[in-house]
Image (spheres, rainbow, N blue to C red):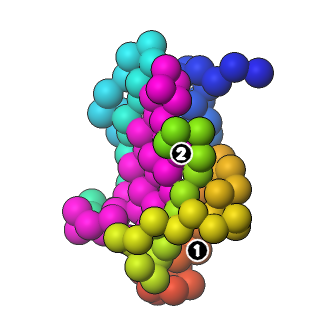
Amino acid sequence: MKESIEGFLLSLEKISKDIRIRELKVIEKTKSILKARLYFSDDIFVQIYVNIKRPKKNYALIINDIRIFGKDYIFGLWHLHPFESPQKHDDSEKARKPVTVGDFVEEAAFILSEKLGMI
């Protein structure tokens, strides 16, 4: 099934109903691009960028304007920006496994609650 921006937006709206998510904010939406944020608090959010024409996806957990964890899909391959070292690109076999935006948000919530004790 072909991906669509509307499909991604519906996924984000469903995820935003989670009690831990305070707000969904759509920053940019066109026929082929979606940039949105799922806020846990004012300074903690997951930023989602999707470009279905490229195709390109970037999911990032942001705290105080700094990415602390991320997963990107570029040039047909996934890679990870691990929590332990978010500036690095992990392109190991495990890091290349596809992830849904819902899976990424769950991992971000786990990091915030279990590793950082923030939510």
Q: Is residue 71 magenta?
A: yes
The quarter of the rendered structure image containing the N terminus is top right
Q: Compared to 40, does 77 lie above or below?
A: above
Q: Taking 110 as reference, is 115 above or below it?
A: below
Please say whether residue 17 is visible from this viewpoint: no
Residue under label 2, please give it: 73
Prevalent SS, magenta region: strand
Q: Nearer the viewer, mark 1 or mark 2?
A: 2
- Secondary structure at badge 1 equals helix
Q: CA distance from mark 1 to mark 2?
A: 21 Å
Point 47% across, 26% down: residue: 54
Label 2 Cα crowd, 10 Å radius (few <14 / some 14-19 / many 20+): some
The mark nearer the N terminus, 1 or 2, is 2
Residue at image coords 41%, 71%: 88
Towards the viewer: 47 or 24: 47
Which residues lie in the magenta part?
A: 44-73
Kind of residue at badge 2: Tyr
Q: Amino acid at mark 1?
A: Phe
- Disc assigned to residue 110: 1
User: Can you tell which mark lies on residue 102?
Assistant: none
Q: Is residue 78 left or right of residue 97?
A: left
Q: Position of residue 106 (x, y in %)?
A: 61, 62
Closest to the observer: 42 or 72? 72
Quarter of the image for residue 10 reads top right
Displayed quadrant of residue 64: bottom left
Quick one: label 1, few (<14), some, or many (20+) residues within 10 Å?
A: some
**Residue 25, percent from left and from top:** 35, 39
Residue sitting at the far right: 1
Identify the residue at image location x=41%, y=24%.
33
